[in-house]
Image (cartoon, helix red, strand yellow):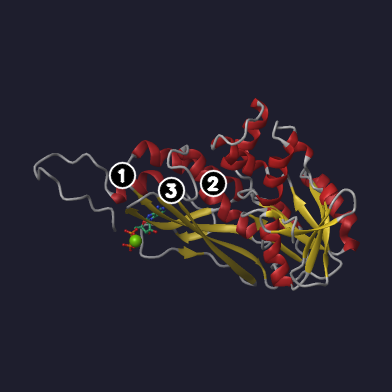
Amino acid sequence: MSFAKPPAATPSAPSAAPSEFDLIRRHFSRPTRHTDLAGGDDAALLRARPGMQLAVSTDMLVAGTHFFADTDAEDLGWKTLAVNVSDLAAMGASPRWAFLALALPAADEAWIAAFARGLFACADAHGVDLAGGDTTRGPLTLSVTIIGELPHGAAITRAGGRAGDELWVSGQPGLAGLGLAALRGEARLAAAGRTACLAALQRPQPRVALGLALRGIASAMLDVSDGLLGDLGHLLECSATGAIIDVGALPLAPLLATGADEALARRCLLGGGDDYELLFAAPAARRAELQVLSAQLGLALHRIGELTAEPGALWLRERDGRLVRGTPAGYDHFG
Ligand code: ADP
Ligand code: MG
């Protein structure tokens, strides 16, 4: 327990502040589906299934670094869990259990209730049990550890890509980056475009169904949290390959439709973070299956390039056929 109140100035003043345990009971206790004992004891007991491997990931969000301190609490609750669910999607794992470590500057119950609403909305959408956590006083910091399951050996890591595999990305990368630019006053967007960009930034949709469906199809995969080219760099490093990206195949038009100018749209598409789309490699022979999958899921899958044999080399093929060296931040015209 660690939500001790600071020493009271007047020891006899009645204390209306809820205890740590009141807060947890009121806001973070919910029935569970795959947990034998969740919350309230020294440890949770997870119902492990025989033959399954566990995928585990932790992500931390710090106010001022990862989000604006005045971000809507319900959106923040959603996103805190969604970014972790996305990491499991990127492995091809089914998310099951989450542990929530919270540092809160104050026991603001309205804020906590809204945060919990957003978090449980995401948990319900993906069948995740909140199985435990820790709650403490401190600068607003949100950390989730998530655990998921997958059959032994079925995980899609960053390391399995081979030269000749085609590169694909889901959905609409760049929208979240445009949303951030709009919040910072760096982009003037049309009203509908602004709404779509802010939704992408604040309510990212982890691509769990896609991640699961790609088991046995994708050779390597990761989720795009830090920007398309930057995250692609991680995949290239782990797979010891290079890549050529076809600029003409990148989904730029929907970004332009928000009202963003072309330079900003390209920057957000290639280098904007917070998208949580899946970037993956797959043998060319799987192309037709992927097109069927895209239709089944109602989720765009864009074939944006291919892996090459030269380790770490990232090239962009411009519309006129010119090859330009790519950098994690976007273009390096002098490279
Ligand atoms: P301990 O002192 O043994 O670490 P705590 O007092 O920190 O236990 O927590 C009590 C119980 O409440 C534990 O089961 C813990 O998992 C759960 N818990 C604490 N904070 C949260 C939270 N934010 N969300 C969900 N469960 C929580
Ligand atoms: Mg504790």
Can you say whether 246 is above or below 175 in the image? below
Marks 2,3: beta carbons within 8 A: no
Residue 130 x %, y %:
48, 54
Callout 1 amino acid: Ala
Q: Is residue 139 left or right of residue 189?
A: left
Inter-mark Cα distance, 2 to 1: 21 Å
Q: Which-is-in-front pick, marks 3 and 1?
A: 3
The residue that mark 1 highlights is: 106
Q: Which of marks 2 and 1 is nearer the N terminus?
A: 2
Q: In this view, does 267 lie to the left or right of 66?
A: right
Q: Is residue 159 visible?
A: no
Disc sitting over residue 79 in the figure: 2
Q: Is residue 123 left or right of residue 255?
A: left
Can you say whether 298 is above or below 228 in the image? above
Would you call the spot at circle 2 few (<14 residues within 10 Å), some (14-19), or many (20 or more)?
many
Q: Is residue 122 visible?
A: yes
Callout 3 amino acid: Ala
Q: Residue at x 62, y 55 (%)?
A: 226
Q: What element carries label 3?
A: loop
Callout 2 amino acid: Lys
Q: In which quarter of the image is the N terminus?
A: bottom left
